[in-house]
């Protein structure tokens, strides 16, 4: 199935990708049709370029959980929905538990999907692990390990520790070729193996120290002969590979938790505030394929060749001045960099710079002051942000609440 996907027609540009996803979603059977605006898809795509965690927020019925699924289908990727439960209090609820009795790790479906997606044959397939209703529990409790590692620029450090100790064990038997190699290369290590074999056969005098077992374990590890936990790093860590994006859907009601600044700053937020409507004239579109390497290459080209960086920086400097002057609040370099890269991909995908800035300001920056009671400062901010409709709408809503 994977190889069949690889042979499908590929997608040459970000603009073509937006058009393809939109037409694929809108041209399905009547029961399966989904409608998204170009900017919704551009925002999702640009979000993929700047963060491995995308939060889709908005009212129920706006297509939050459907967007990553339909996007994945359109490009021949993988998609897995993981429902978040309100009882989740720590990482074990997401990843699973180590059973000391049977010495096995009882993995949750999230970890199984993470493991499967990291297999070599899957690493060119775009994969979306969707945490549905992500804020039913506190995200920074159960997802904290991922929030930390995904900030690492070195992707080799994207490792999640499942347990604190190596879950691999010594094998009960070894191939004759391995024993011959060990006997020739390291007779002292081979003698340790012989002691263990005699001990298993009931020889009470064949004692082996913990240090000797560690020496043997290290040797057999190099030969790939340890039992259990294969494909884990050091027998205890799982890798987050470059083909994986985490997508969280978020509602705002009395049953959910407020998403913290820590999460918002590290994630890319896409707001879906109204149910999609048909724009008509959708072209019947079959699935196509884009590899992870080609997708990331399109992102990198858009970011490296962008001509809008100065405009973005000037707009953010103006906004930062207002926030400092009127609210004594600022935003960090991470948001500036995210906004520059987000805007570059959004514009390369056919969007307008003002729309890209409106997305970022309304979802990532405005939340730092939107709860303010200073109506005069909010009014000045509204006037300064007049070219950004979504931002103005949020400020208007807050001003009405204060009247």
Image (cartoon, grey):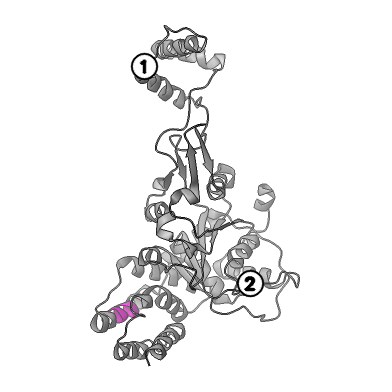
Residue 333 disc label = none
Mark 1 surroundings within 10 Å by alpha-carbon count, few (fewer than 14), some (14 through 19), many (20 or more) = few
SS state under label 1: loop
Report the front residue among 248 and 322: 248
Residue that numbered label 2 is attached to: 22
Q: Quadrant of residue 129?
A: bottom right
Q: Which residue is labeled 1 in the image?
A: 209
Cα–Cα gap, marks 2 and 1: 64 Å
Q: Is residue 241 visible to the viewer in this orientation of the structure?
A: no
Q: Residue 300, position in %: x, y?
A: 45, 61
Please say if 235 is above or below 111.
Answer: above
Where does residue 294 sit, x and y in percent of width and height? Answer: 54, 57
**Mark 2, other Cα within 10 Å: few <14 / some 14–19 / many ≥20:** many
Overall secondary structure of the magenta section: helix
Residue occupying image coordinates x 43% and y 23%: 217
Image location of residue 315, percent across then percent down: 34, 80
Question: Does residue 368 lie above or below 134 as drawn?
Answer: below
Residue 158 located within the stretch drawn in magenta: no
Q: Quadrant of residue 259?
A: bottom left
Q: Is residue 200 above or below residue 7?
A: above
Which quadrant: the C terminus?
Answer: bottom left
Quarter of the figure with residue 17: bottom right
Instruction: Identify the secondary structure beneath mark 2.
Output: helix
Q: Which residues lie in the magenta part?
A: 314-320
């Amino acid at each position: 199935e994977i190889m069949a996907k690889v042979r499908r027609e590929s997608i040459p540009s970000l603009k073509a990708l937006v058009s393809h996803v939109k037409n694929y979603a809108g041209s399905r059977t009547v029961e399966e049709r989904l409608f998204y605006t170009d900017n919704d898809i551009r925002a999702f795509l640009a979000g993929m370029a700047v963060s491995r965690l995308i939060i889709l927020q908005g009212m129920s019925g706006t297509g939050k959980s459907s967007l990553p699924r339909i996007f994945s289908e359109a490009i021949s990727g993988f998609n897995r929905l993981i429902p978040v439960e309100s009882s989740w209090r720590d990482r074990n609820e997401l990843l699973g538990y180590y059973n000391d009795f049977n010495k096995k790790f009882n993995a949750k479906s999230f970890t199984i999907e993470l493991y499967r997606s990291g297999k070599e044959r899957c690493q060119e397939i775009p994969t979306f692990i969707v945490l549905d209703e992500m804020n039913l529990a506190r995200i920074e409790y159960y997802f904290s390990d991922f929030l930390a590692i995904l900030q690492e620029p070195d992707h080799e450090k994207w490792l999640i520790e499942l347990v604190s100790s190596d879950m691999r064990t010594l094998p009960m038997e070894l191939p004759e070729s391995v024993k011959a190699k060990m006997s020739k290369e390291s007779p002292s290590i081979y003698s340790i193996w012989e002691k263990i074999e005699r001990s298993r056969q009931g020889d009470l005098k064949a004692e082996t120290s913990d240090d000797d077992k560690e020496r043997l374990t290290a040797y057999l590890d190099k030969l790939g002969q340890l039992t259990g936990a294969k494909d884990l790093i050091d027998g205890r860590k799982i890798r987050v590979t470059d083909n994986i994006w985490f997508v969280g859907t978020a509602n705002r009601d009395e049953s959910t938790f407020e998403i913290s600044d820590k999460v918002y700053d590290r994630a890319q937020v896409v707001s879906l505030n109204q149910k999609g409507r048909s724009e008509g004239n959708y072209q019947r579109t079959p699935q196509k394929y884009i590899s992870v390497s080609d997708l990331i290459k399109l992102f990198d080209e858009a970011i490296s060749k962008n001509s809008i960086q100065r405009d973005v920086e000037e707009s953010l400097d103006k906004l930062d001045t207002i926030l400092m002057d009127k609210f004594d609040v600022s935003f960090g370099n991470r948001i500036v960099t995210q906004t520059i890269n987000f805007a570059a991909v959004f514009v390369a995908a056919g969007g307008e710079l003002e729309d890209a800035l409106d997305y970022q300001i309304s979802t990532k920056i405005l939340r730092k002051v939107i709860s303010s009671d200073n109506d005069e400062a909010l009014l000045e901010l509204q006037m300064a942000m007049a070219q950004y409709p979504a931002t103005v709408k949020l400020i208007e809503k807050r001003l009405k609440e204060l009247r």
